[in-house]
Amino acid sequence: MRVLISEDVRHTAMQYKISLEERNHHVITTVNGEECLRIYQEEIRAKKDKENPFDVVILDYRMPHKDGMTVAKEIRTMNPTQRIIFASAYLKDALIDSMRDLHGVEYLEKPFELDELVETVERVRK
């Protein structure tokens, strides 16, 4: 799978990356919302067909430059079928209220085990 991660805590991003790469997934990490959107836009332009450039995008909610909710909304504007997982310590109820317009967005509440992240990423949506 191709995975794009946006997590401002570099150590956390590297833990996610290593765990997913151990399962042979291709992972790109970014450290803020603007960088995530730039990479996403580059990938969507490079991919001429209508397929998603990534199998999943993992976003932290609180990040510098653009928060995860802003990034998710902009990604969904470019590509309404993109699978997005929020991995955040932000209060779940407050985040869920903000996610109402983003149907099908998934949520992992920090702290969680890395195995749980891998299982969530590898779970096929139906």
Image (cartoon, rainbow, N blue to C red):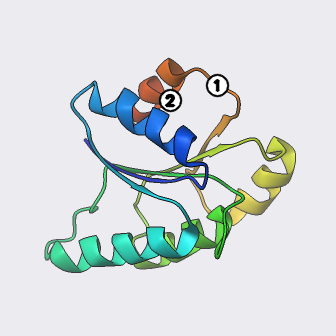
Q: In terms of image quadrants, where is residue 54? A: bottom left
Instruction: Please say if 9 is above or below 30.
Output: above
Location of residue 53 in the rendering, given as x and y in whole percent from the top left corner: 26, 62
Q: Secondary structure at mark 1?
A: loop
Query: Distance between the Cα atoms at labels 1 and 2?
Result: 7 Å
Q: Can residue 123 be seen in the rendering of this structure?
A: no
Furthest residue in direction front, as rendered: 11
Dots 1 and 2: beta carbons under 8 Å?
Answer: yes
Q: Secondary structure at mark 2?
A: helix
Q: Is residue 122 left or right of 44 when viewed as pictured?
A: right
Amino acid found under the numbered disc labelled 1: Phe
Residue nearer the viewer, 53 or 100 = 53
Mark 2 sits on what residue? 117
Instruction: Please say if 86 is above or below 126.
Output: below
**Residue 112 has which mark?**
1
Residue nearer the viewer, 89 or 123 = 89
Q: Can residue 31 be seen in the rendering of this structure?
A: yes
**Quadrant placement of the C terminus:** top left
Which residue is drawn at the image coordinates 70% and 58% (left, top)?
A: 99
Instruction: Please say if 123 is above or below 10.
Output: above
Instruction: Please say if 45 is above or below 57.
Output: below
Amino acid found under the numbered disc labelled 2: Leu
Q: Which mark sits nearer the N-terminus, 1 or 2?
A: 1
Q: How many numbered marks, from 0 up? A: 2
Which residue is drawn at the image coordinates 26% and 71% (left, top)?
A: 43
How many residues crowd mark 2 within 10 Å: few (<14), some (14–19), many (20+)? some
**Residue 28 has which mark?**
none
